[in-house]
Image (spheres, rainbow, N blue to C red):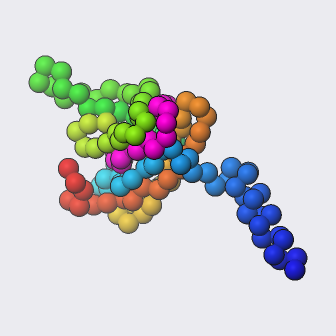
Amino acid sequence: MHRTRVVPFLLMLLFASGAVHADARLGVFDAWIRAAPPGATMMAGYATLKNSGDEPLTLLTVQSDAFRLTSLHETIVDRDVSKMREIHRLVVEPGTEVRLAPGGKHLMLMQPRHAIAVGDKVQVIFLLADGTRVETYFDVLAPDSSDD
């Protein structure tokens, strides 16, 4: 009898504490990181971000305990030269998707804290302007298995 009361209470506590949080408005799909050679100090992450809510969502930054530095970047072409620039705000309009893909917007994941290999899963947290944290996992894939 006590178990039937305790389990729902514990589940409620778990979700209320923020230990497990998924924001139903921002979906993260097909999340992957391109594996890099041993000793590499930079990696890139890709995914599709979908806003299923009724309001625009503004992504400010990303975090990952697996890397010392993380940021959003975009590859642009200026006078026939490819350059990367940091993105400080990425707006995902209601009902739309933003693709983080090779040659475009992407995550820069710098200074790994430990070796990251093909087959690993890396936790990434997206931080929104309203304070929401969206936690997800990125699969680490071999460079030749990506969809460039």
Q: Report if residue 54 is visible in the image.
A: yes
Q: Report if residue 111 is visible in the image.
A: no
Quick one: 32 or 99, which is closer to the camera? 99
Residue in the picture at 83% in, 70% down: 6
Quick one: 115 or 81, which is closer to the camera? 81
In percent of width and height, residue 106 lies at: 34, 40
In percent of width and height, residue 86 lies at: 37, 27
Residue in the picture at 39% in, 28% down: 87
Q: Residue furthest left?
A: 80
Quick one: 50 or 126, which is closer to the camera? 50
Q: Residue furthest bottom?
A: 1
Residue 55 part of the magenta segment: yes
Residue in the picture at 42% in, 63% down: 120
State the image quarter where residue 130 is shown: top right
Residue 68 part of the magenta segment: no
Q: Residue furthest front?
A: 54
Task: Locate residue 14 relative to residue 59 in the image: left or right.
Answer: right
Task: Locate residue 52 relative to residue 147 in the image: left or right.
Answer: right
Q: Residue furthest right?
A: 2
In percent of width and height, residue 134 lies at: 54, 46
State which region is magenta: 43-60
Please say if 17 is above or below 57: below
In percent of width and height, residue 129 lies at: 55, 30
Decide whether the magenta segment is chiefly helix, strand or loop. Answer: strand
